[in-house]
Amino acid sequence: MDRHEVVLLHGQPGSGADWQQVIALLPPELHAVPVDRPGYGTSRQPAGGFACNARAVLAELDARGIDRAVLVGHSYGGGVALSAARLAPGRVEAVVLLASVGPGCLTGWDRLLAAPVAGEVCALAAWWLTPWLARARLACITRRQRRPMAAHEHVNWQIWGSARHDHGPVWRTFLTEQRAMVHELGDLTASLPGITQPVLLVADPADTLVPVRATERLAELL
């Protein structure tokens, strides 16, 4: 049986462990490789934008002896997967994007985080408050099982709810990535027509974190 390497790229914040429930559902011919992106989980690499993350993913493939792989990216990880596909097309067999960032995904919040001083203040305040808000949201979801939230959004809130306010390096990683996204998204968008690998796009119109218009624009440009 041929084995296909599938590299799983988490969103922000998060870690490779976020994929555990997904990995349990994959068939045996798919070898899942969840990775911790720079600045998250066990990674000791400094945080950066899409290109920085893409180089880290390719280095991870080298370290594991993987020549080619399917890249699966969720949210910010989708931008990383696309960047890697453009940077090293021979190493990326295909791309799967789950509620991926893309053209049209930026909000006023994203631009505020990219601003000097105001970005640090807002990111730090959000990092203190978000875990409690997310846990309250999860409790609300649990109480209304008859009308469950979309599964991927439920997982998003689980990730935020498990975040600890004293993880200083993680909130700095989050801020670094947000700023990089504002500055790099234009270049990533311009590179999309050059991506020749098969790309599968998955999104939920009810997603409240990454607007579905980003996936629609990706579909138009790829």
Image (cartoon, helix red, strand yellow):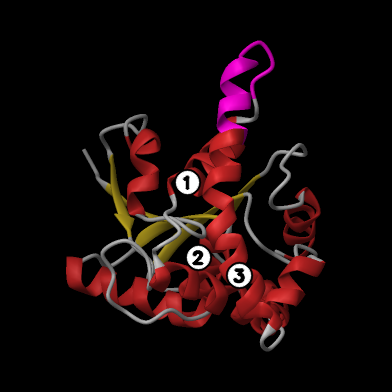
- Name the side, left or right, on which 179 lies relative to 3: right
Q: On the image, which quarter does residue 133 sit in? A: top right
Check if mark 1's residue and mark 2's residue have beta carbons within 8 Å: no
Q: Residues within 10 Å of mark 2 (few under 14, many from 20)?
A: many
- Name the side, left or right, on which 25 lies relative to 62: right
Residue 37, placed above or below residue 182:
above
What residue would you read off at disc 3? 123
Find residue 16 and report its horizontal and vertical position in percent.
34, 53
Bounds of the magenta segment: 137-148
Residue sitting nearer the eye, 217 or 11: 11
Find residue 222 and report its horizontal and vertical position in percent.
70, 64
- The type of residue carrying mark 2 is Ala
Front label number (1 vs 2): 1
Find residue 91 and report its horizontal and vertical position in percent.
37, 70
What residue would you read off at disc 1? 159
Residue sitting nearer the eye, 147 or 117: 117
